[in-house]
Image (cartoon, rainbow, N blue to C red):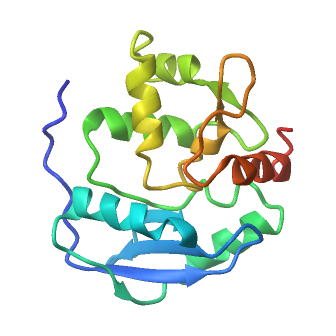
Amino acid sequence: MGDNRPMSRPASLLLDRLPSPIGELLVVTDETGLLRAIDFHDYEHRLDRLLKIHYGPLRPEPGAAPAATRDALTAYFAGQTDALRPLPWDTNGTDFQTAVWKALGSIPAGATITYSELASRIGRPAAVRAAGHANGANPLSLAAPCHRVIGMNGALTGYGGGIERKRWLLTHEGAL
């Protein structure tokens, strides 16, 4: 699978908490300002688990995300649905996961794709389940917009933030 590339280890992680219309956001950045994770406050346990997987014992300290990150999130919820696209991010995911997460970032706001199409976009059309699993392990939530992936029949299938949030996000972006 080629998933043994060197991991990008930050020296420190910062955790910021930002309001949104669908619940408080937990935003993790590193000392260089790279976005490392986004999740919702009611899934803090999942965020902590993902951070342990990706960064081992390194825990985030309270701290403000860069102004550009905060501004992009504010703009997104204010209706500029492409505002998150230019945010720089990095993770310690495998090569396969990173390919899936980058592919998620290429889905335009207001559009949706299926899990099958997601697998095809990374050149692995038979890896639909693996692409779905990587989608579900996405630590970047809104920045790598996993909510834009739907079931083959158009159903709003699983979303880590809950189906109601997925529906809200897709409606906000004009996809529903």
Q: Quick one: quadrant of the C terminus?
A: top right
Residue shown at the point (43%, 55%) measured from the top left: 139
Instruction: Quadrant for residue 22, please give it.
Output: bottom right
Please tell me whether residue 106 is drawn above or below residue 167 in the rendered image.
above
Residue shown at the point (81%, 49%) measured from the top left: 173
Would residue 152 appear left or right of 175 to someone viewing this image?
left
Please tell me whether residue 46 is drawn above or below residue 17 in the rendered image.
above
**Percent position (x, y) of residue 103?**
50, 34
Q: Nearer the viewer, residue 98 or 136?
A: 136
Please tell me whether residue 15 is drawn above or below residue 49 in the rendered image.
below
Farthest residue, direction top: 126
Residue shown at the point (66%, 77%) measured from the top left: 71
Residue 66 visible, this orientation: no
Q: Nearer the viewer, residue 100 or 137?
A: 137
Would residue 121 appear left or right of 14 to someone viewing this image?
right
**Percent position (x, y) of residue 160?**
54, 50
Residue 89 visible, this orientation: yes
